[in-house]
Amino acid sequence: MAPSLRRFWRQPTVHFMVLGSLVFAFEEAVSRSADAHPTLEFSAPRVEQLASDFASQMGRPPSDLQLIDLVEQAIREELLEREARRLQLGYGDRGIRHRLLSKMRAVTTDLSLSEEQLLAEARRLGLDDDVIVRRHLRHKMRLLLRRAPPTSWSEAQLAAALERHRQRFEQPATVSFAQVFVSALGAAGERRANELRAQLTGQALTPDAAQFNTIQIISDPFPLGTRFNHRSHAEIVVQLGGEVAEQAMELAPEQWSQPVASRFGWHLLWVHDRRPAGLPGVDEVREPLTRLLAEEQAARQLQQAIDGLRQSYRITVDWPEPRLAQLAAARETLANPEVTS
């Protein structure tokens, strides 16, 4: 480098100019970044209002983690609303249009304004900053973000979903049985039931197809009939009472029970077959499984979209206490393991 050029770069004025240019370039970059990422700010009074609303509804203040969840939910709701407004989802919506027109007609005396003029004036006055309008916009945005093309689920996916949600689909043990009913109550009813049981066992009468009419003639009329197919213990309790349910679930197949009392009278039971508790086959629950997988897909898509919206905003929360800020940061790190300090 030439001596004259070295002397030029050593001058303090040049250093100041270069430093100033760097600072200006940095500020420009920050400014552009801020423009690209709008700010969503939650002030301490707003956080405290969420806590106050919770206390009014629940009769107690929220815990720290509950308050963090309340703020997180409020952030999601505002992100959805802002995006809905950016996409102008309220324009052309009949519900929002009707509400804004109703509000505008309540405050204006100019009857010459057209509906479009009224709507424009309502938005200029901020009348669309309304709890019902905001709720409607968020709902429309959720529907838009959840929308997904129809998916064909493989047998493996359906089977995996069935196992994953086994508590939801697991079926209780069931029993199928027939009964001979005696409507008389008390000792007289029990004697009659014992006589019928002796007749049934002595003549080897069973509720099969050939002898079913005979059983029906022997039995007193019963509102729910004489046959009960694939009933769980809980269902039998509701229909016939606890004692009948216990006997039906414990009775060995293809034999007549001893007389069992209920609030209706006396029952003689014959068990045809039992089904143990367990998961049904995929074919038996294919339709609800398909709906469940579609719902899970929509929920994932919505969450991914909201996560993307979060990345496009600079979100700041003014927590009223330092420990809340620490807890919130810890939860954010757990939810996003790739984020490090």
Image (cartoon, grey):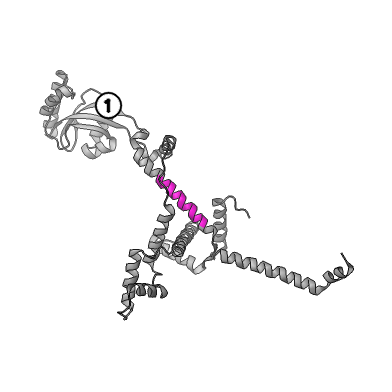
Query: Whole-percent x and y of residue 312?
Result: 54, 60
How many residues crowd around disc 1 within 10 Å: few (fewer than 14), some, or many (20 or more)?
A: some
Is 289 a magenta residue? Answer: no
Tell me how many marks there are. Answer: 1
| Residue at x 42% of width, y 75% of height | 124
Residue 133 shown left or right of residue 331 in the figure = left
Q: Say which of 243 and 335 sits in front.
A: 335
The percent coordinates of residue 101 (x first, y second) are: 33, 71
Q: Is residue 340 above or below residue 256?
A: below
Q: Which of the pair 243/98 is nearer the observer?
A: 98
Up/down of 291 relative to 103, above or below? above
Regarding mark 1 in the picture, which secondary structure is present there? strand
Which residue is more in the foreground, 145 or 181?
145
Residue at point 38%, 74% (across, down): 122
Q: Which residue is mark 1?
A: 273
Magenta stretch in the rendered image: 294-308
